Image (spheres, coloured by chain):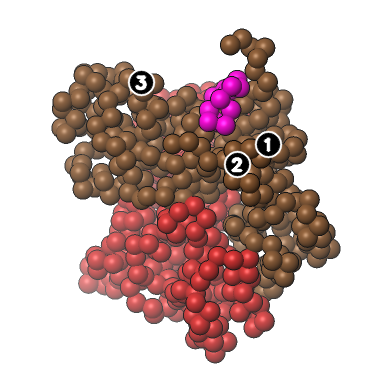
Chain colours: A red, B brown
Amino acid sequence: MTNNEWKYRVAYLGPEASFTYLATRDVFPNEWIIAYRTIPECIDAVTNDMVDYAVVPLENALEGTVPLTIDYLFHEANLYIIGEIKLKIQQHLMVNKAQKDNWEKIEGIYSHPHALAQCHKYLFYRFSHVPLHQTTSTAEAAKMVAENPDKCIAAIGNASSAEKYGLEIVEENIHDFHFNHTRFVILSKHNTRLPIENSDGQPKTMLMLTLPHDDSGALHQVLSVFAWRKLNLSKIESRPLKTGLGNYFFIIDVLADENEPMMKWALEELQSLGCTVKSLGTYYTYNASE
Amino acid sequence: MTNNEWKYRVAYLGPEASFTYLATRDVFPNEWIIAYRTIPECIDAVTNDMVDYAVVPLENALEGTVPLTIDYLFHEANLYIIGEIKLKIQQHLMVNKAQKDNWEKIEGIYSHPHALAQCHKYLFYRFSHVPLHQTTSTAEAAKMVAENPDKCIAAIGNASSAEKYGLEIVEENIHDFHFNHTRFVILSKHNTRLPIENSDGQPKTMLMLTLPHDDSGALHQVLSVFAWRKLNLSKIESRPLKTGLGNYFFIIDVLADENEPMMKWALEELQSLGCTVKSLGTYYTYNASE
């Protein structure tokens, strides 16, 4: 394939073989996908027209929202969400092939803090005396194990990083909780949603909202706008406005299309109540293959 | 002072000279306060009767809620909040006294990731080419600078850590945002709130709540219970139930005493709506001296 065949450039939170890479590769199998080091760098790449889209993690089923993504979208960027990718997170224990017969005697385990947390019980019962070391990503941990064949150490990460760095998976699915998924969002400068094919077909709209005043009924009044219209909210979350303790903005996911009449009226009504409200656009969810 | 004069043992998130230490020392000047390495260890120390109280960070005005504190209180512990401490977070740049004349030529800056983030703009404009290094706490960074008098490096942290490790503060208040406070909670096995003296006198009750069903109106209905009674909420936040994406529990702070008749009825009504609701107790806020 030559460069000319790529239609889009897509930034993702790297390095290669990260979970974000897997999500991005699944939805953009034929595009030019480019690893960036941090979430703000991915978002800035779209803002500055270095790429057409960016894929960044938004929420994990165990760890909750990724605050950096939400805060950067609210405070620093002006982008739209044009699609969402849901990926099952499976963590495996992997060692250098030179050490595959010694893996039960490993002397150190490397991974991203979230991956270590997701395997907390496994590590506690199976390797309670083995020191844990934090890395900036699960792929980075795999790379370190690959580069040290003489050391009896292990990494925790996905199958793709084991493959990329030629490691041996010695225990599969060591994460403590089932149903561990992560949501990734696809960001663009333009509010033109990705096509509905291969998606779950359920439109979802993300709103960022600040309340007009801070009394007992303000949030209740906002939710009334949706409730009596039977507009279902799949998520509501508060984040600091950074103007002082107790001042928040809200992120609300509504299971409806922003162009439906009911949604348009709801958004107008919120504004007339004195709320500052911004729609990040309507999008569909793609389930990444496992 | 001898051991017999201490009435209580209080665990706090260490090490000594951490921000949690400052908050704890302010409210418990004459008690036996003991540093623990992690938030779960502080909480477990109360559960296992190693200490009477624990002080842990709950929320920062810039970074938001400390997820580990909320999640551990919901999923793993059964404790009460008996008081809250509000502390102003002031970050300073400090160097070894041997390097105090060379501080403008520093070759590395060490601190906790949150402190580095809180000084992001200062660092960007003043030291954009100086590498930043993460440490597990601001006090740890100060210790490292103290132990390396021959290196031209700096730490970011509070005045107490500069004092403890004999460092020179070369720039004061380098954090980007004013109004940067952190809320710490005082945890106990028993629901016996701390006395009202020196507090702000405003009772606050923290509720942890799961919804009975997941339709458009569930959260709206819950908020109605408070709204028509004019019970003011100072915070609402969602966190994952860890049973799958899209399943949350809510943390609600109500500006009222759990023993007021209106609050008792509200809690009963929530239960009859099918909510699972747990009160972590009513408490007052203490403003730590700066």
Q: Is residue B117 above or below residue A71?
A: above
**Who is closer to the viewer here, B215 or A87?**
B215
Q: Amino acid at mark 2?
A: Ser
The image quarter containing residue B115 is top left
Q: Is residue A113 above or below residue B50?
A: below
**Dot 1 and dot 2 residues touching (CB under 8 Å):** yes
Q: Residues within 10 Å of mark 3 (few under 14, many from 20)?
A: some
Residue that sits furthest to the top in the current view: B2
Residue under numbered circle 2: B199
| Chain of residue at mark 2 | B
Q: Residue at x 33, y 44 (%)?
A: B175
Q: Position of residue A5 (x, y in %)?
A: 26, 72
Extent of the magenta region: B24-37
Query: Depth-wise, is mark 1 or mark 2 nearer the camera?
Result: 2
Q: Amino acid at mark 3?
A: Tyr
Residue under numbered circle 3: B165
Q: Residue at x 46, y 45 (%)?
A: B181
Q: Which mark is residue B194?
A: 1
Residue A286 visible in rendering: no
| Chain of residue at mark 1 | B
Marks 3 and 1 sit apart, C-alpha to C-alpha, by 33 Å
